[in-house]
Image: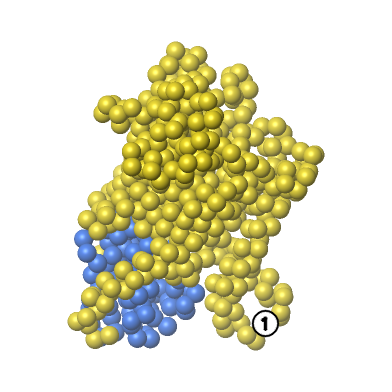
């Protein structure tokens, strides 16, 4: 039975379903609260883990509420001409950059810029193509897992294990490594345990990436004053101006025509255009609100993590685990992956690597795991707590809005999920991050490499859409064959 | 589950994309509407929440109207009725 004219989820459903969903939402919330409180009772230093957890929970709720997804942002522009999500992302970019600048000036930033290089474009291209196939970016797939989509879970698993494959693969892939990378990696004098000259990814990192220079726009523009570098260089020039210009381009290409339809008589030149631009920004209240919350909370996340590091007297979670007596899974430098801000993909790769280790594979003979990030027990991986809570936060929001549905994918959807997820994993490792770590967190912290990743991701999205259009046109032709159309 | 696009009666079509994730629901909806005549009605069934936002924006941009905006009672399945402009 359809209920008509309904906008609010509550009115769409039976009261029994709503009550049951609210109960489940409280159970999920209670579960994460219990983890936070019980671990704190055991050792107060677990507050560091809980900080990641609760920011993850907020991200999950916001992403689900705003249907926030980078794949949607790029794909819907090219596929169906809908700018809603691209607008939401740009709103979040502007706000995150302003909060990041404040955090940087306060000396509380945990951000480290990535080097500038062609790898960002190539990684973005592979990642962008994959995310159109799967239907969600890395953060999008996590929040959709929270909505009950097993296809999204397949994407997460697929991108996790494909990263592990790329990081660990040697053999024939060694033949694709330029000799200059091998020589440069050998010259770094790395510990023998990480076998730096064996494996494509090891040599990519030590022989190529490490030779590039990380730089922020504030530094590029020659600002020596932290305030000017953070607010003018990093926020205004690197994030706000590009975002405003991109929004302008989106307005003229995808929104203006629809906005001006029927308003020809009232057209007042620039004032009408400005009003149309504002209308585009506020067209989706959900997306705009989510962008606002994400932008502000992502900035605050850095502040909180840096504050906790100071309070606990650490600079990396590895020191924390060491102090707690957990030595297993740390890198040979006794470090762990601990970005201190919103990040996805590396922690999922660590989880997959931990499973592979349990199956007998050695994951610690790589620079990525053995020297830098470690392979901790997933229960003792603070950044993985963030991912788990992101799924939980999304589940709570979906349950409260009666949008949770356990969905098992068909073979077709599962194939897209696994294939696209593999591309996303490879793209994330080549690009040194995903739509969050290599784009959202970078462009907002003054790192121009994020725009290079974004450029590649957009091009990859365009290629993916072209392919998908062909695929769906083909399927539709079969469906309408017997209809009078 | 495969997609279903069928004629219900004259000027009324049903598109069922339940079980499909982004971008399938919005792309199938776009293709279906392109093939229909002005004034025709499309009954759309989908269960991927994020597709709803995109489909609503797409309809607004192209002038198609969502004449009913509901859900299957007690289920997280959206049932929308769209009139092609």
Q: How many marks?
A: 1
* In the foreground, A41 or A69: A69
Colour assigned to chain A in the rendering is yellow
User: Where residue B49 sits in the image (x, y, percent)?
Assistant: 38, 57
Residue at 24 percent of width and 67 percent of height: B3
Quarter holding the N terminus of chain A?
A: bottom left
Label 1 crowding class (10 Å Cα cut-off): few <14, some 14-19, many 20+?
few
**Can residue A59 be spotted in the picture?**
no
Residue at 65 percent of width and 52 percent of height: A239
Quarter holding the C terminus of chain A?
A: bottom left
Badge 1 sits on which subunit?
Answer: A
User: Where residue B20 sits in the image (x, y, percent)?
Assistant: 30, 60
Q: Which residue is mark 1?
A: A267
Q: Is residue A472 left or right of residue A373?
A: left
Residue at 48 percent of width and 23 percent of height: A191
**Which chain did the image draw in blue?**
B
**Can residue A480 be spotted in the picture?**
yes
Residue at 43 percent of width and 16 percent of height: A327
Q: Secondary structure at mark 1?
A: loop
User: Where residue A398 sits in the image (x, y, percent)?
Assistant: 39, 49
* In the foreground, B50 or A350: A350
User: Where residue B18 sits in the image (x, y, percent)?
Assistant: 27, 61
Name the quadrant containing residue B65.
Answer: bottom left
Name the quadrant containing residue B52.
Answer: bottom left
* In the foreground, B56 or A132: A132
Q: Is residue A88 left or right of residue A144?
A: right
């Amino acid at each position: 039975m359809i209920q008509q004219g309904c906008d609010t989820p509550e009115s769409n459903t039976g009261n029994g379903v709503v009550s049951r969903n609210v109960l489940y939402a409280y159970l999920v919330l209670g579960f994460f609260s219990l983890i936070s409180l019980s671990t704190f009772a055991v050792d107060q230093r677990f507050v560091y883990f809980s900080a990641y957890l609760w920011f993850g929970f907020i991200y999950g709720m916001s992403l689900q509420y705003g249907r926030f997804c980078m794949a949607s942002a790029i794909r819907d522009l090219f596929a169906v001409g809908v700018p809603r999500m691209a607008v939401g992302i740009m709103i979040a970019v502007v706000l995150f950059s302003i909060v990041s600048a404040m955090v940087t000036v306060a000396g509380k930033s945990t951000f480290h810029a990535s080097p500038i290089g062609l790898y960002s474009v190539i990684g973005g291209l592979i990642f962008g193509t994959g995310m159109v196939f799967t239907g969600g970016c890395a953060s999008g797939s996590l929040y959709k897992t929270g909505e009950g989509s097993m296809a999204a879970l397949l994407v997460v698993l697929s991108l996790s294990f494909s990263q592990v494959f790329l990081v660990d693969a040697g053999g024939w892939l060694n033949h694709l490594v330029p000799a200059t990378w091998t020589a440069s990696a050998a010259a770094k004098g790395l510990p023998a345990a990480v076998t730096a000259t064996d494996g494509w990814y090891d040599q990519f990192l030590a022989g190529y990436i490490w030779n590039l220079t990380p730089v922020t726009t504030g530094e590029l523009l020659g600002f020596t004053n932290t305030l000017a570098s953070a607010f003018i260089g990093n926020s205004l020039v690197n994030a706000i101006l590009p975002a405003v210009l991109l929004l302008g381009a989106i307005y003229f290409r995808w929104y203006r025509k629809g906005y001006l339809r029927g308003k020809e008589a009232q057209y007042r030149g620039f004032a009408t255009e400005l009003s149309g631009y504002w209308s585009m920004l506020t067209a989706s209240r959900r997306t705009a609100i989510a962008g606002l919350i994400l932008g502000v909370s992502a900035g605050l996340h850095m502040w909180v993590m840096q504050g906790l590091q100071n309070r606990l007297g650490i600079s990396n979670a590895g020191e924390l685990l060491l102090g707690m007596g957990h030595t297993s899974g740390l890198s040979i430098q006794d470090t762990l992956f601990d970005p201190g801000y919103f990040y996805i993909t590396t922690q999922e790769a660590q989880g997959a690597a931990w499973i592979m280790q349990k199956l007998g594979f050695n994951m610690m003979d790589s620079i990525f795991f053995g020297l830098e990030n470690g392979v901790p027990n997933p229960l003792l991986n603070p950044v993985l707590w963030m991912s788990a809570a992101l799924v939980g936060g999304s589940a709570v929001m979906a349950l409260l809005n009666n949008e949770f549905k356990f969905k098992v994918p068909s073979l077709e959807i599962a194939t897209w999920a696994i294939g696209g997820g593999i591309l996303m994993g490879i793209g994330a490792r080549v690009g040194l991050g995903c739509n969050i770590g290599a784009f959202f967190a970078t462009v907002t912290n003054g790192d121009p490499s994020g725009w290079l990743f974004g450029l590649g991701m957009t091009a990859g999205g365009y290629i993916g859409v072209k392919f998908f259009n062909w695929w769906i046109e083909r399927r539709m032709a079969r469906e309408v064959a017997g209809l009078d159309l | 589950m495969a997609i279903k696009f069928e004629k219900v009666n004259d000027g009324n079509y049903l598109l069922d994309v339940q079980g499909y994730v982004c971008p399938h629901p919005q792309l199938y909806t776009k293709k279906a509407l392109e093939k229909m005549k002005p004034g025709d009605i499309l009954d759309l069934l989908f269960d991927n929440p994020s597709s709803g936002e995109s489909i609503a924006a797409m309809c607004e941009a192209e002038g198609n109207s969502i004449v009913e905006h509901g859900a299957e009672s007690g289920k997280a399945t959206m049932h929308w009725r769209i009139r092609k402009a």
